[in-house]
Amino acid sequence: MFSKNVLLKSTSLVALGALSILSTSCNDDDNKNSSPIGNGDPVMMVDPEPTTKVSWNYDDKGPAQWGGLSADFILCAEGLEQSPIDLIVSTIVKKGDDTALTFDYKTDAVLQAINNTHTNEFAVDKGSFVTFNGKKFQLAQFHGHAKSEHEIDGEQSPLELHFVHVSDDNELLVVGVLIDEGEENTNYTSFWTSENFLGTEAEKVDQLVSGTHDLTKLFPQDSPLYQYDGSLTTPPCSEGVNWNVLTTKITMSAAQLALFTDIFDNNYRPVQSLNEREVISTEENSDAVAQAIN
Ligand SMILES: [Zn+2]
């Protein structure tokens, strides 16, 4: 579909955009990129090294303080289109457009496991995309929050994964997946293992994950979605993020959840005000369909 040159060029643009937009970690020590494959290797598209020097956390410099930590973080306090939000199902309008977001993920993706002291993240090699209203966004990485950041009717889940996508012009699209405790999730077992959950809340680690991984089964890609305009859920809380939260939750076993929560058990931002925004659902409105038929 793309020539190699075009793809490499767009990948480098995405990487730059991801660097500037997704600079979500503190960096007190000015380390150079320590990625084992990050220097000159075109496989990995996201430089895991954070760029902001203002430190923040989920504790004494937590979500209620973020907006005052730096002028660059002002949206965390004053933004009117912030994430996450409580998804109140009875207020969500069903518009039934299940073609708005389509997935084209790789079945043989290469991953890099990263603990950036704010979350455990898996950076993804190039070539996995979504198309949203005709625009293409490349999957850059996915990471977790415990408990979940989005709520559905006021309820949190033990874990939420964010699949972060970037377009060539640096627009962001995130797919949120809420995870409850239940059956072991065998779609994750190739990489969701103790070897890839290293470091602590104070210790950065990154390493290449062995093997290749099927990203197409990590969540049901045909699930209806809750869609709204929001923000990064970490400083600088930049707005203009296209949010798509699956209406369908998935499960992991208690042991799988513990791999994440043994390191991060409180790295979520509380829900923010909806303000003037509308949340829509891609689910069919069965009432409207019935009326149309009659
Ligand atoms: Zn996130």
Image: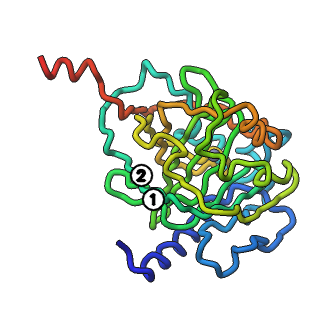
Amino acid type of the residue tagged 2 in the rendering: Phe
x, y (%) of residue 76? 65, 44
| Residue lying at 13% horizontally and 21% vertically, measured from the top left | 293
Q: Residue at x 68, y 37 (%)?
A: 269
Mark 2 vs 1: CB contact within 8 A: yes
Q: Please, which colouring scheme is shown? A: rainbow
Q: Which residue is mark 1?
A: 129
In space, the residues marked 2 and 1 are separated at their CA atoms by 6 Å
* Numbered tag placed on residue 61 in the rendering: none
Q: Position of residue 133 (x, y in %)?
A: 33, 51
Q: Foreground: 198 or 6? A: 198
* Chain-order first, disc 2 or disc 1: 2
Residue 103, disc: 2
Q: Residues within 10 Å of mark 2 (few under 14, many from 20)?
A: some
Q: Is residue 129 left or right of residue 235?
A: left
Within the image, what quadrant is residue 82 found in? top right
Examine the image and state in which quarter residue 77 appears.
top right
User: 96 left or right of 78?
Assistant: left
- For the point 63% across and 46% down, which residue is it? 188
When asked about the image quadrant of residue 43, the answer is bottom right
For label 1, the SS is strand
Quadrant of the drawing holding the N terminus: bottom left
* Above or below, comparing residue 34 to residue 239 in the picture: below
Describe the element under mark 2 as helix, strand or loop: strand
- Of 26 and 35, nearer the camera is 35
